[in-house]
C-alpha cells in the first residue's frame, strides 16, 4: 500500500530539520464560473506549509520517529495523478445542537501545473457567513484540504471557547505524530475502494479548563485512498459532551469528484449553445 514504505535516513533527517521551521471550498459540477481568485502574488509555498504543519517548533524531541499518519498526510504526493488543471469538489456538512446546521461546498482549483508536477492552487471554502478565506498555494504536491479543515476547526474552537487556536492546532499536530494508519474499505458511487484511516483524539489526555471540557471526547477521522483524486476521501469530527449527552457536534468533509477545466469549459459551451 502507498503509505507503508521506509524513508531513507537522510530524508528523515532533512524532514525533521524542516519541521522545526513551524509558525508562520452542497456540491455541484455546474459551477463553471466559481468565484475563485487566481492572483498568486501573495501565495504560500504549499510544501513548506505542509511540512510546518507536521510538528511544533522547539518540541521536535516529542517525535522519536515519523508515524505512518505523518507520512500519509505530510509526505505522500496526493496530487501526483492530476496532470492537467482541474477542480476537486468536496461537500461540507455540520450538525450541531448549539449552532445552526448547514451544508456547503469546498473547491480546490488547480490552476497551473509546473514541470515537476507541483501545483498552483486556489480555494473556495464555503460561502456566506461560513466562508473561510485561505491564501493560494504554489508548489503543492500534497492535498492541502486536510490542513484547511484542521485550521478552520482550530479557529472555530477558539471562537466558541475563547481559547487559543495555537493550542488546538498544536494538540492536533502532536496527535497525528503519534498515530498510525489502519487499512479500511469504503463505498463511493457504488464501488468499493481500498484506503487508509487515521483516527485520533487530541484532547483525551489533556488537562482542559471547564470552557473547553466538551472537547475531551472530540475525535478526528481522516480516510484516504490512492484511488481517489487528491487521496483525501473524507474528514470528520465528532463531539459528545460527557456531562451533557444532548450536546453534540458532527462535521464531515467528503469528496464529491473531480472535473478538469477542459471538461468544465466544454460543458459550459454545450449549455450555452443549447440555450
Image (tube, rainbow, N blue to C red):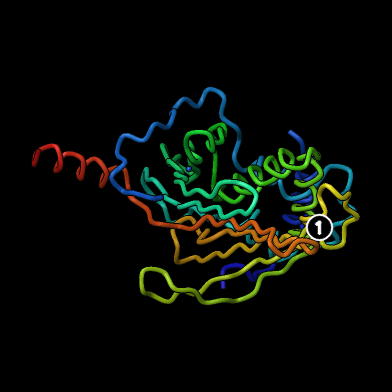
* Residue under the image location 79 percent in, 37 percent down: 162
Q: Is residue 194 left or right of residue 69?
A: left
Please name the residue that numbered disc 1 is placed on: 203
Q: Is residue 181 visible?
A: yes
- Seen in the picture, residue 88 relative to 235 is either above or below; the reply is above
Q: Secondary structure at mark 1?
A: loop
- Seen in the picture, residue 193 relative to 228 is either above or below; the reply is below
* Residue under the image location 76 percent in, 63 percent down: 217
* Residue under the image location 57 percent in, 68 percent down: 2
Query: In what quadrant of the picture does the N terminus appear?
Result: bottom right
Judging depth in this view, the residue of 272 and 179 nearest the camera is 272
Q: How many marks?
A: 1
Q: In the rendering, at what x and y percent does residue 62 appear?
A: 88, 56
Instruction: Report which quarter residue 47 is drawn in.
Output: top right
Q: In the rendering, at what x and y percent does residue 43 appear?
A: 56, 29
Q: In the rendering, at what x and y percent does residue 10 appear?
A: 76, 56
Q: Residues within 10 Å of mark 1 (few under 14, many from 20)?
A: many
Judging depth in this view, the residue of 208 and 84 nearest the camera is 208
Query: In what quadrant of the picture does the C terminus appear?
Result: top left
Residue with the most extreme left position: 274
* Residue under the image location 53 percent in, 61 percent down: 234
Q: Is residue 120 visible?
A: no
Residue with the most extreme top position: 41
Instruction: Report which quarter residue 266 is drawn in.
Output: top left
Judging depth in this view, the residue of 59 and 164 nearest the camera is 164
Q: Is residue 126 left or right of residue 221?
A: left
Q: In the rendering, at what x and y percent does residue 128 appear?
A: 48, 34
Amino acid at each position: 500500500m502507498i503509505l507503508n514504505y521506509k524513508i531513507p535516513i537522510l530524508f528523515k533527517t532533512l524532514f525533521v530539520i524542516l519541521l522545526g521551521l513551524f509558525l508562520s471550498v452542497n456540491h455541484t459540477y455546474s459551477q463553471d464560473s466559481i468565484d475563485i481568485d487566481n492572483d498568486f502574488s501573495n501565495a504560500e509555498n504549499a510544501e513548506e506549509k505542509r511540512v510546518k504543519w507536521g510538528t511544533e517548533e522547539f518540541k521536535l524531541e516529542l517525535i522519536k520517529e515519523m508515524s505512518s499518519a505523518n507520512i500519509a498526510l505530510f509526505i505522500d504526493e496526493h496530487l501526483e495523478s492530476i496532470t492537467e488543471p482541474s477542480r476537486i469538489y468536496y461537500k461540507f456538512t455540520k450538525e450541531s445542537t448549539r449552532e445552526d446546521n448547514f451544508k456547503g461546498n469546498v473547491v480546490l482549483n488547480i490552476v497551473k501545473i509546473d514541470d515537476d508536477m507541483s501545483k498552483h492552487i486556489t480555494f473556495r471554502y464555503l460561502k456566506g457567513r461560513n466562508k473561510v478565506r485561505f491564501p493560494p498555494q504554489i508548489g503543492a504536491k500534497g492535498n492541502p484540504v486536510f490542513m484547511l479543515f484542521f485550521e478552520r476547526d482550530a479557529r472555530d474552537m477558539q471562537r466558541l471557547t475563547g481559547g487559543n487556536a495555537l493550542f488546538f492546532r498544536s494538540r492536533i499536530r502532536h496527535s497525528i505524530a503519534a498515530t498510525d494508519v489502519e487499512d479500511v474499505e469504503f463505498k463511493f458511487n457504488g464501488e468499493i475502494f481500498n484506503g487508509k484511516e487515521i483516527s485520533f483524539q487530541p484532547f483525551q489526555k489533556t488537562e482542559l479548563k471547564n470552557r473547553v471540557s466538551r472537547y475531551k471526547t472530540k475525535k478526528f477521522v481522516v480516510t484516504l485512498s490512492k484511488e481517489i483524486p487528491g487521496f483525501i476521501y473524507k474528514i470528520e469530527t465528532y463531539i459528545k459532551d460527557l456531562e451533557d449527552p444532548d450536546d453534540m457536534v458532527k462535521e464531515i468533509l467528503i469528496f464529491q469528484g473531480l472535473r478538469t477545466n477542459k471538461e468544465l469549459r466544454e460543458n459550459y459551451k454545450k449549455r450555452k449553445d443549447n440555450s
